[in-house]
Image: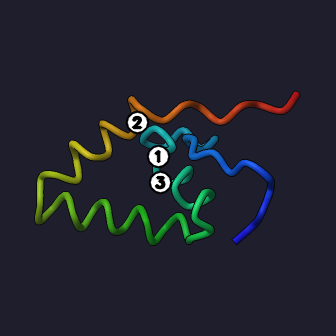
Amino acid sequence: MKSTGTNQLTRGKTFIAGGVCSGLANHYGLNKGGIQACFVIGSLFYGVTVFLYLALWVILPNKPSIA
């Protein structure tokens, strides 16, 4: 994992479906595609992941843009 001082959990810059998976992948140093696959498979078998994703989309702040 990368150590950059304060590693705040934020939504990623990718706009595909809100950037929640991208933000989780960046924060925990995981593969974004793997997290997306887990959310998709979880939503097929358990409806809770859809609500979890929506809740994270509302709760997590956007990643600050570096200009």
Q: Which residue is mark 2?
A: 57
Q: Amino acid at mark 1?
A: Val
Residues at circles 2 and 1 in contact by the CB criterion of under 8 Å: yes
Q: Are marks 3 and 2 in contact (CB under 8 Å)?
A: no
Task: Give the label on residue 21, or none.
Answer: 3
Residue bearing the label numbered 1: 20
Identify the residue at image location x=30%, y=37%. 54
Image coords of residue 49 (percent x, y) = 23, 53
Marks 3/1 in contact by CB < 8 Å: the verdict is yes
Asked if residue 67 is positioned above or below residue 29 in the image, the reply reads above
Residue type pointed to by label 3: Cys
Tell me: 37 left or right of 25. Answer: left
Within 10 Å of disc 2 (Cα), the crowding (few <14, some 14-19, many 20+) is some
Q: Residues within 10 Å of mark 1 (few under 14, many from 20)?
A: many
| 43, 51: nearer the viewer | 51
- Residue 41 in percent (x, y) is at 24, 67
Q: Amino acid at mark 2?
A: Trp
Name the residue at 54% across, 38% down. Answer: 15
